[in-house]
Image: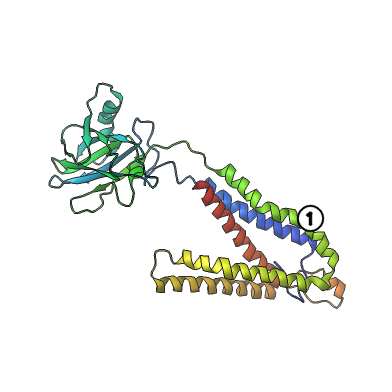
Amino acid sequence: RGFPPGHPPPAPGRTTMFRAVLVAASCCGLTLLCAAEDDHGHSHDGDEHGDHPWEWSGIFELSGDQIYTWSAARGPGGEYADPAMKLSVVPLGDHAHVEDGEPAAEEAFEDPTASWRTVSTGDTVVVASTSATNLALNFNPDSWVSLFMLRPTTTGYFAFFAEHNPVEFENGFHYLKDAQGQDVEPHDAAAEAEEVDSGLGAALGAAVVVTLPTLLMLPLIGPAVQRCGSGRFPVINSFASGAIFAAAAFLVLPESMHLAGAGMDAAAAHAVWGVAVLGGWLIGVFVHHVSDAVLHAKEVADTAEQSKKIDWAVAAAVTFGDFWHNFVDGMVIGFSAKA
């Protein structure tokens, strides 16, 4: 970032310190995103559920006077996540504890002689109230969605143990709905944790590649700029300022308006975008004036001595902006790696 005329650039030693702070901010944001263990495979509002033969389990409170629809849809690629899925439904009565249904589910999944009813799309299944209902769901390869009707014989809690996470088969709507078309959410859902690559290594590698041009330009261009003399700094700063303004006008501001308004109406989107832009500018002004009042070096008569001083009114605002710039860059790279 260029320094305006009348404000000498920081001394080389301090410049190195500033860049170290900025690189640390970028790495901090990147590491926080990649180290966050909030996504283990296909879990859906659940956590690790131990070593079981099923991938997902959940408890639903169902009514005996309704027919529920269990659905499985093709994914964005045009294929089902799997062509079939085993689903064991264990009645729990008035107890909403998934552990109470695990013995019956383990017997069904692990016993090779266990009976599984083959169910095709459109079939209605009566869910027993005293024993497990074991279903082998076959998805219709000729349709984009397969629907299975479940009719409980009594009202109460039922534990569902699925061979695959039902979220894998969602495409625009929830996997379980009641007779009125309302989503039926599990009271307690848990998915088996899958061993997946956190992407931290790839993210750090990408961060190095992204910053490599800047790091290489410092030793190549820095000495040449220094030899140009301070008289040419206004010209260099003008080009730097133009590049920054162009990036803001053509890239950052339009893209930020698009992202800030996601899911909002036009008025709300414009309000959020305007407050964010003006708020960012006002924070910079605030940092500038606070730094000028608190940290600004006292003026000295000797011009040579003055050139060695840092104008904190400028340097602090630039460092503050670059800190968050690099921090957000690290977060973006981290999100990309986890995706």
Image location (x, y in percent) of residue 139: 28, 38
Q: Residue at x 73, y 71 (%)?
A: 237
Q: In the visual, does 198 lie left or right of 160?
A: right
The residue that label 1 is drawn on is 219
Residue that sits furthest to the bottom in the current view: 301
**How has the structure been colored for display?**
rainbow
- Residue situated in front as seen by the camera: 143 or 205: 143
Image location (x, y in percent) of residue 95: 22, 40
Q: In the visual, does 244 lie left or right of 49?
A: right
Q: Image quadrant of residue 321?
A: bottom right
Query: In this rendering, does residue 219 appear at all?
Result: yes
Compared with 272, 336 (above or below) is above
Q: How many marks?
A: 1
Compared with 203, 290 (above or below) is below
Compared with 149, 163 (above or below) is above
Residue that sits furthest to the front in the current view: 142
Q: In the visual, does 299 lie left or right of 294?
A: right
* Residue count near mark 1 (Cα–Cα under 10 Å), binned few <14, some 14–19, many ≥20: few
Query: In this rendering, does residue 311 appear at all?
Result: no
- Residue situated in front as seen by the camera: 130 or 56: 56
Amino acid identity at mark 1: Pro
Image location (x, y in percent) of residue 239: 72, 70
Which of the image's four quarters has the N terminus? bottom right
At numbered mark 1, what does the secondary structure look like: helix, strand or loop?
helix
Q: Residue at x 40, y 74 (%)?
A: 267
Q: Residue at x 52, y 42 (%)?
A: 198
Compared with 121, 212 (above or below) is below
Q: In the visual, does 36 lie left or right of 58?
A: right
Image location (x, y in percent) of residue 116: 23, 29
